[in-house]
Image (tube, helix red, strand yellow):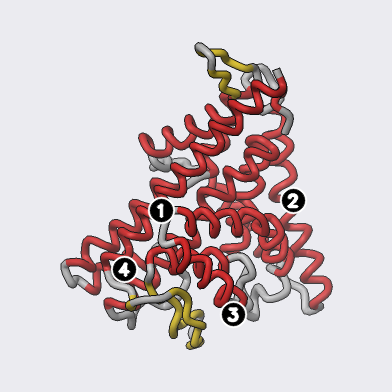
Amino acid sequence: MSFDYYPIFITGNLALCNPASAVVAALLLDALLGEPKRWHPLVGFGWLANRIEHKLNNSSSTLRLRILGLMAWLILLLPIASISYFATHSIVAWLADVTLLYFSIGASSLFLHAKQIYKPLSQHKLAEARHAVSMIVSRDTSPLNETEIATATVESVLENGNDAIFGAIFWFLLLGGTGAVIFRLANTLDAMWGYRTPRYQYFGWAAARLDDLLNLIPARLTALSYALCGHTLSAIQCWHSQARTWYSPNAGPVMAAGAGAIQVKLGGAATYHGQRKQRPTLGVGESANQSHILSAINLVKRSVGLWCALIIIGTIIGSVYFA
């Protein structure tokens, strides 16, 4: 995105372009307001996605299911992307961008859910902790012990640091609010349809692959951020040696680097949709406990600070250069 897209405000000897101020404003709104308690756009989007999936996911042909899944993805995203584009190229462009990025990031919600698991887990209230962790993971949580609950929570915080924060910011910097919205909605459809189950294996193929594509660069920037904001050497070593063993090409680098950065072991056995999977080990050090949940939250927060600092510095330099 060219810097002349936004007006430039001069304060003293510093020139700050609105891409940086929009990111900071959206993050501040998220920190102050959190996610909307009612009428969240993603809730309505999820309802619509379910309706369309039930209408279209009804073929016995694997090829036809792949095509229908791609059609469903386009039907859901193209109209919203078009509306977002026109809103962010109007006289209220900056406000539209801030609003769209605010709705696209979920830092406060992520931290809140993690702390809602941390509190009962630290008090050894396993039933309450299992219920809380079931709200943010897709695995079966009913048999989880304390270590497994902590592991699931840390994995979710690290992975969703990319999905709910850094990926949206990355695409915002490239394409404005439209990019952030496309990324978050594509990520939502992957979370809904991107499973290798009989129902979604073919219909959800396009959603999963497109999400992989959109996450290709952001995931590695997130992994690098975790490495720089934690135990750097351990993070880089884990990223290099362990990321390729993970099932997801993008979650692997993020979780391996994050686990190395806070020096905890993740992975291990977990049950998904009734099937027990033995997952590769990520990270180093001891098995996860409740303290690692706070470590993961703090790692993501430090990474957010790093991104904000770099974006502000970059836009100041860019505004001077392009002035």
Q: Is residue 156 left or right of residue 179?
A: left
Which residue lies most toward the front here? Answer: 233
Q: Secondary structure at mark 3?
A: helix
Circle 2/circle 3 CB separation < 8 Å: no
Residue placed most toward the observer, 231 or 171: 231
Q: Amino acid at mark 2?
A: Ile
Q: Which residue is mark 2?
A: 75
In the rendered image, which quarter is residue 323 located in? Answer: top right
Q: Which residue is mark 3?
A: 245
Q: CA distance from mark 3 to mark 1?
A: 26 Å
Residue at image point 74% right, 64% down: 206
Q: Amino acid at mark 3?
A: Thr
Q: Secondary structure at mark 2?
A: helix
Circle 3/circle 1 CB separation < 8 Å: no
Q: Which residue is mark 4?
A: 131
Q: Amino acid at mark 1?
A: Leu
Circle 4/circle 2 CB separation < 8 Å: no
Q: Is residue 179 left or right of residue 316?
A: right
Residue at image point 47% right, 65% down: 233
Mark before the other along the chain sequence, 2 or 3: 2
Mark before the other along the chain sequence, 4 or 2: 2
Circle 4/circle 3 CB separation < 8 Å: no
Mark before the other along the chain sequence, 2 or 1: 2
Q: CA distance from mark 4 to mark 2?
A: 34 Å
Which is more foreground, mark 3 or mark 1?
3
Residue at image point 43% right, 63% down: 261
* Vertical comparison of 230 with 320: above or below: below
* Residue 57 locus on image (x, y percent): 71, 68
